[in-house]
């Protein structure tokens, strides 16, 4: 009797939790930009806080007991790999955690902390035997430095360029970002737009909303914005990913794009798999989604899935990959695409 061959699995959205060690990768001349760690003097709780340029935020807000500490902080790479083996995962695509919020309005600080993070992840990748790939953070306030960091990432295991749904005071269709898109296209790196808050004004206004408009809507809005401005047509070989916002919004947003496109005499956008294919758009789904409905509307060639392993956000599902594989709600062929074929193509692995 033949033994079944296990489908390889790529977890398309994982996280590392930054610690003070992250910024040990700073250059000596950048030490003045190092984020500090604060604790409450009155001892009212045991929370620790990052502090940078007059702002403080909790360090452990997205930490849960289901994720081994040494693994989520990449302090013990073997522990991370062992954890992946337990879950039946071959490759993790690593995204940041503290950078899911705006960090600074100053270009020199942005470069110093992004550079340190990228060196840290390069070190993680070097120890991971090819199984820990990552999204490079470009310091977008200095375009020359951003391009340098993208090249560094490509040379050191990065497979995507990290973006938030808006960056500082710009939406992602702004031509300011086109040099990054062009470079990513040349280097065969995806543009990965992760659920996040990209500017202080948005964060300050919406932070008490418990997350949806603060962190999720900017990414969903970026999908619509990039399509309606036809930015993917300018970079026909560039792949775009919209990560950690589930997928069930896709039919609604495609309908909205069609309605809005009627204002443009020269274009009518398709509302189905054709749009995903023509524009190289990929979306991270979740097992809670009605995947049969989504696949019926947009196909199964541009969906990926991740556990958000390392960061127990509302979209985190430590068993998402095995659930997709085992619950029978999605065909075996679609499951293979979502677990392996699609993320392999998205991240050019």
Image: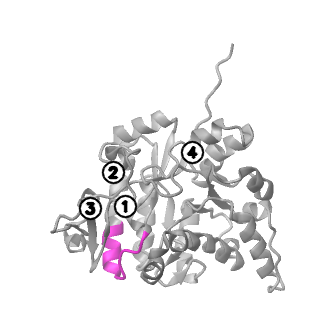
Q: Are marks 4 and 2 in contact (CB under 8 Å)?
A: no
Secondary structure under tag 2 reads loop
Q: Nearer the viewer, mark 4 or mark 1?
A: 1
* Residue 258 on the magenta segment: no
Residue extent of the magenta highlight: 101-114
Q: Which residue has dot 1 on it?
A: 61
Q: Which residue has dot 3 on it?
A: 47
Residue 331, x across and y down, in percent? 75, 40
Q: Nearer the viewer, mark 1 or mark 2?
A: 1
| Image quadrant in which you'd find residue 333 | top right
User: In this view of the protein, can residue 184 be seen by the observer?
Assistant: yes
Q: Which residue has dot 4 on it?
A: 320
Q: Badge 1: few (under 14), some or many (20 or more) residues near its Cα, within 10 Å? A: some
* Image position of 37 (left or right of 239): left
Earlier-in-chain disc, 4 versus 2 = 2
Rounded to the nearest angstrom, the CA distance separating label 4 from label 2 is: 21 Å
Earlier-in-chain disc, 4 versus 3 = 3
Earlier-in-chain disc, 2 versus 3 = 3
User: In this view of the protein, can residue 198 be seen by the observer?
Assistant: no
The relative height of residue 242 versus residue 233 in the rendered view (above or below) is above
């Amino acid at each position: 009797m033949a033994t079944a061959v296990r489908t390889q699995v790529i977890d398309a959205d994982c996280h590392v939790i930054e610690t003070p060690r992250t910024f040990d990768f700073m250059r000596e001349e950048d030490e003045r930009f190092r984020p500090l760690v604060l604790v409450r003097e009155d001892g009212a709780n045991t929370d620790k806080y990052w502090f940078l340029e007059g702002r403080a935020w909790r360090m452990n807000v997205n930490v849960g007991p289901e994720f081994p500490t040494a693994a989520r902080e990449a302090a013990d790479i073997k522990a991370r790999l062992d954890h992946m083996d337990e879950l039946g995962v071959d490759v993790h695509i690593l995204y940041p955690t503290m950078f899911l919020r705006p960090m600074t309005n100053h270009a020199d600080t942005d470069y110093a902390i992004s550079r340190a993070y990228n060196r840290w992840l390069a070190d993680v990748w070097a120890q991971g035997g090819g199984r820990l790939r990552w999204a490079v953070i470009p310091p977008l306030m200095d375009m020359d430095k951003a391009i340098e960091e993208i090249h560094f990432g490509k040379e050191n295991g990065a497979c995507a360029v990290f973006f938030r749904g808006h960056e500082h005071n710009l939406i992602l269709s702004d031509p300011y970002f086109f040099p990054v898109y062009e470079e990513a296209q040349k280097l065969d790196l995806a543009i990965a737009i992760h659920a996040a808050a990209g500017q202080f004004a948005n964060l300050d206004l919406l932070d008490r909303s418990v997350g949806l408009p603060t962190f999720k809507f900017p990414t969903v809005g970026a999908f619509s914005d990039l399509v309606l401005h036809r930015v993917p047509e300018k970079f026909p070989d560039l792949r775009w990913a919209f990560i950690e916002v589930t997928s069930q919004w896709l039919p609604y947003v495609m309908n909205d794009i069609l309605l809005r496109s009627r204002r443009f005499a020269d274009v009518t956008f398709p509302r189905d798999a054709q749009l995903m294919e023509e524009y190289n758009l990929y979306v991270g789904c979740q097992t809670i989604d009605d995947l049969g409905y989504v696949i019926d509307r947009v196909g199964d060639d541009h969906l990926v899935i991740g556990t958000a392993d390392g960061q127990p956000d509302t979209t985190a599902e430590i068993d998402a990959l095995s659930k997709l594989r085992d619950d029978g709600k999605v065909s075996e062929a679609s499951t293979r695409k979502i677990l392996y074929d699609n993320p392999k193509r998205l991240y050019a692995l």
